[in-house]
Image (cartoon, rainbow, N blue to C red):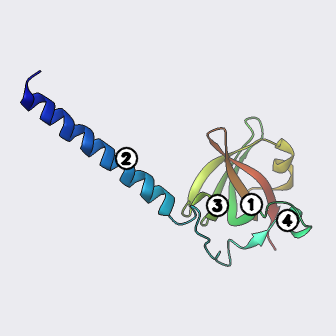
């Protein structure tokens, strides 16, 4: 290898290192990554487990049920912000591990629900009809 080639390689490796460090620092400084954020009113509804002294307080998001697919254990929810996932409001399909949750809701219901990332998928772990 000639000197010019080694210099270009060195510059490229340095640039990659700086980019990786910048991305890592930005990820650690992002809201919800270690820095406590005050929840908004739609985010601050704890589940019954946390109200009863559960170990972790699950934050509930607001939504409206658009579709229920019991055969595939999926539910489509038009939802507001999901704070614990740093996800803005949208309509999306969620997986449900516990199919019994789908028996508690109907299309058109206004709900409060908790979703979390499990094994690479976003899964609804609790759902309650909203008043």
* Horizontal relation, residue 64 to residue 54: left or right: left
Q: Write down the residue under mark 3.
A: 84
Q: Residue at x 44, y 52 (%)?
A: 24
**Pair 4/1: label in front:** 4
**101 or 103: nearer the viewer:** 101
Q: Earlier in the sequence, mark 2 or mark 4?
A: 2
Q: Earlier in the sequence, mark 3 or mark 1?
A: 3
**Pair 2/1: label in front:** 2
Q: Write down the residue under mark 2.
A: 20
**Distance from Cα at disc 2 to Cα at disc 4:** 38 Å
Q: Earlier in the sequence, mark 2 or mark 1?
A: 2
Q: Number of labelled discs?
A: 4
Q: Residue at x 90, y 66 (%)?
A: 53
Q: Residue at x 43, y 57 (%)?
A: 25
**Pair 3/1: label in front:** 3
Q: Write down the residue under mark 4.
A: 50
Q: Quadrant of the N terminus?
A: top left
* Horizontal relation, residue 108 to residue 27: left or right: right
**Distance from Cα at disc 2 to Cα at disc 1:** 35 Å
- Label 4, residues with CA under 10 Å away: few <14, some 14-19, many ≥20: some
């Amino acid at each position: 290898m000639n000197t010019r080639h080694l210099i270009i390689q060195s510059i490229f490796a340095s640039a990659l290192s700086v980019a990786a460090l910048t991305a890592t620092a930005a990820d650690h400084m992002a809201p919800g990554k270690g820095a406590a954020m005050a929840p908004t009113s739609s985010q601050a509804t704890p589940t019954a487990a946390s109200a009863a002294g559960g170990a972790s307080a699950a934050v509930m998001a607001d939504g409206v049920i658009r579709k229920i697919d019991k055969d595939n254990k999926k539910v489509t929810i038009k939802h507001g912000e999901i704070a614990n996932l740093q996800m803005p409001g949208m309509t999306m399909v969620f997986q449900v591990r516990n199919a019994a949750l789908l028996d508690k809701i109907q299309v058109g219901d206004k709900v409060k629900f908790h979703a979390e990332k499990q094994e690479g998928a976003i899964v609804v772990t609790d759902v309650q009809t909203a008043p």
